Image (cartoon, rainbow, N blue to C red):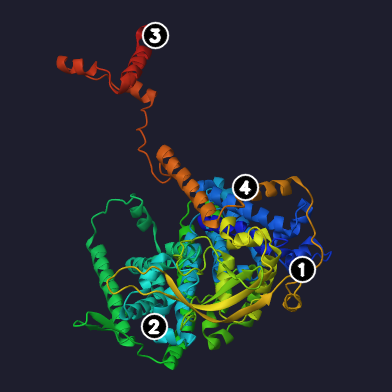
Amino acid sequence: MSVVYMVAFASLYIQIPGLYGNEGILPARWQMRYTGKALLEQLQDSPTLLWLGPSLGLDTQQGMELLCLVGALLAFGAMVMEGLRDSLVFLLLWALYLSLYQVGQVFLYFQWDNLLLETGFLAILVAPLSLFRSMSSSKHHDGITFWLVRWLLFRLMFASGVVKLTSRCPTWWGLTALTYHYETQCIPTPLAWFAHQLPVWFQKLSVVGTFVIEIAVPFLFFAPIRCLRLGAFYLQMFLQVLIILTGNYNFFNLLTIILCFSLLDDDSVNSWLGRSKKKKAKTWPEAVVSWAALLVELGVYVLIIYFTKLYFAVDINWKSKSVSSKTAFTFHQFNHFLKTVTIPTIWLGVLSLTWEVVTAMFKCACVRGFFWKLWATVQWAIFTTSAAGVFALSVVPYTYIDYESNSNVWPVVRKAYETLDRYQLVNSYGLFRRMTGVGGRPEVVIEGSMDKETWTEIEFMYKPGNVSGPPPVVAPHQPRLDWQMWFAALGPHTHSPWFSSLVHRLLQGKRDVIDLIQADPSKYPFSQQPPAFIRARLYKYWFTESSEDGSLPPQWWRRKFVEEFYPTVHLGDPVLENMLVQLGVKDKGPIRRGQDSPISQALRVVREHVRTLTGPLVIGSLFCTGAAICLLKTLFLGSPGSSRPKPAPAEPRSKRAKDPPAPAPEKTERKEENRPSDGGKENSEDRALDSDRSPRKRK
């Protein structure tokens, strides 16, 4: 979890000047309205630590940079030092990211930002509290807190699978979504080009597998049989690894993988780390239970395969060496299924959580000593109440998948959810709801000119532009401007007010904004002088096809012009000025500069050192440094979980003094005993004891 936090803070820090700076696309100072209210009232209106910036002599941009640096360094410390993986540290990390989220506007409104905040809040409950380590903090409640992580994973995966069908997207219903996905996703990887070349029947079968993993398999998260949970874990990991290989989805997949670890138990983790214990011989009742569990496991997988074949009409054609598939159910049938299972899944969660609570309660009752039993019970009560509250709140966004179920949520729970919504404790999810780009990937290409005659394309570092340029590998960094450019291409520019601000900043030649597009000035065509005119055009992009002989084509993309996306404008153009005012992205009043404090000076020094660095380079450097430190610690200090054999305790001197003298050994044995062993330590100790026993010493 600390690694994901480090990635998120470092990635955002690199982009703050261009996105949220005083001369950025959407200055964060617009979100900070100092009305003269007391600090507590301001925190209630907008829970962000940026309200403390003026007291430190910092403006809003510098405040965001400070929060990112503190968060990245604290997360890095937690990565390399086990002592910092503490609930208080995760509380601070969560508060720092929430503070940035409050002023992040459209560039921070992604589902993985919400997922990071929700997972980060659960990490506060899961992590140990160092204040009570000296009091031997009870861990009997771990099953309760880890259950919350498992419930979040269930909501994430189940909703992501369900919304694909409730959206009535024809590509998902026709099982053809993946024939478009690889080339139409925001920032594909080079492997996405090869995945796009796979035959259609395989793409359709892959969609079927996606539905099974996201809709059917999540029910196994709560299975009482360990092997079923492990099977669900490996299937989810398989899906996440495939997404990582074919798409740049920043830290989202890493975060999902972290959630998947809640499906494992200690035995699974220890076996990976080489700490597995020797298996004991099973008694006959244990063997019977083991065989019964195996039969149930096989039965569950057989049922999944059977219903998959039934509802998706999966059929193997041995002659053509292909597999045919299609949806064999209607939207109304699926909607009926959803109404049938939504409420039962909530009760499944209630029963599963109740089991964890009761199990933890019995563990607390078995603690020896009145004080320690009371202490364990107090912790159990606190975490049980917290888990019940979080679960109740999560029911509201979870039932968004079914309107009828959502309307039946208790009003008191709904009101509590609305009150706490600003803290992003629980959220609704639904990734890839509809497949965009059917008929070609829409892409906005910005062009600049000095004379309105010769136009030069402005290429971005990561998003598709040059048809000869290969797709990049940029994850886990998220270039947020490139991502928003993908969303902007899906509709008119008026749906993306920030785009007019971007054009305005490029005409002004603002270096911070240009760094978001090209960190290397030599690759930006107007690095010496800003363009006098700017326009934007909409193209349709497609992956090129592989040749019949299997050779790779010279270009990765092919494209076709569609229409003008943004009119030709220049600085002082009335059209541009009117759009800035109408869309609410016009500069609002003079910039309030922070004081020249030591903190602001230090922030400027750090910024100058990283200005020319890209996000992937910074994140890669931090991760490699942390991994190297952890490796060195393991090599020189040993694994944290490894246990060295303890030497046998020395026999008490008083006891040995009372022992009767040993019989005189034979002559040959005496020669062997006179030889020093183990460096002569034992013999020297024996000689010292003999000298203490001697009559001359006692006299």
Q: What amino acid does circle 1 point to?
A: Asp
Q: In 3D space, how far apart are the residues under numbered discs 2 and 4 (Cα atoms)?
A: 48 Å
Q: In 3D space, how far apart are the residues under numbered discs 3 and 4 (Cα atoms)?
A: 74 Å
Q: What amino acid does circle 3 point to?
A: Lys
Residue 321 in which image quadrant: bottom left
Query: Residue at the spot x=26%, y=63% of the render?
Result: 286
* Residue corresponding to mark 4: 609
Residue 224 is at least partly visible in this image: no
Tell us which disc is closer to us: 3 or 1. 1
In the rendered view of the protein, which quadrant contains the C terminus? top left
Q: In 3D space, how far apart are the residues under numbered discs 3 and 2 (Cα atoms)?
A: 96 Å
Report the front residue among 248 and 287.
248
Tell us which disc is closer to us: 2 or 4. 4
* Residue corresponding to mark 3: 697
* In contact (CB < 8 Å): disc 2 and disc 1: no
* Residue corresponding to mark 1: 587
Left or right: 14, with 80 as reference point: right
* Residue corresponding to mark 2: 176
Q: Is residue 21 above or below residue 394?
A: above
* In contact (CB < 8 Å): disc 2 and disc 4: no
Q: What amino acid does circle 2 point to?
A: Thr
Report the front residue among 24 and 58.
24
Tell us which disc is closer to us: 2 or 1. 1
- Which is nearer the N-term, disc 2 or disc 4? 2
- Which is nearer the N-term, disc 3 or disc 1? 1
How crowded pointer 1 is (Cα within 10 Å; few <14, some 14-19, many 20+) is rated as some
Residue 12 in which image quadrant: bottom right
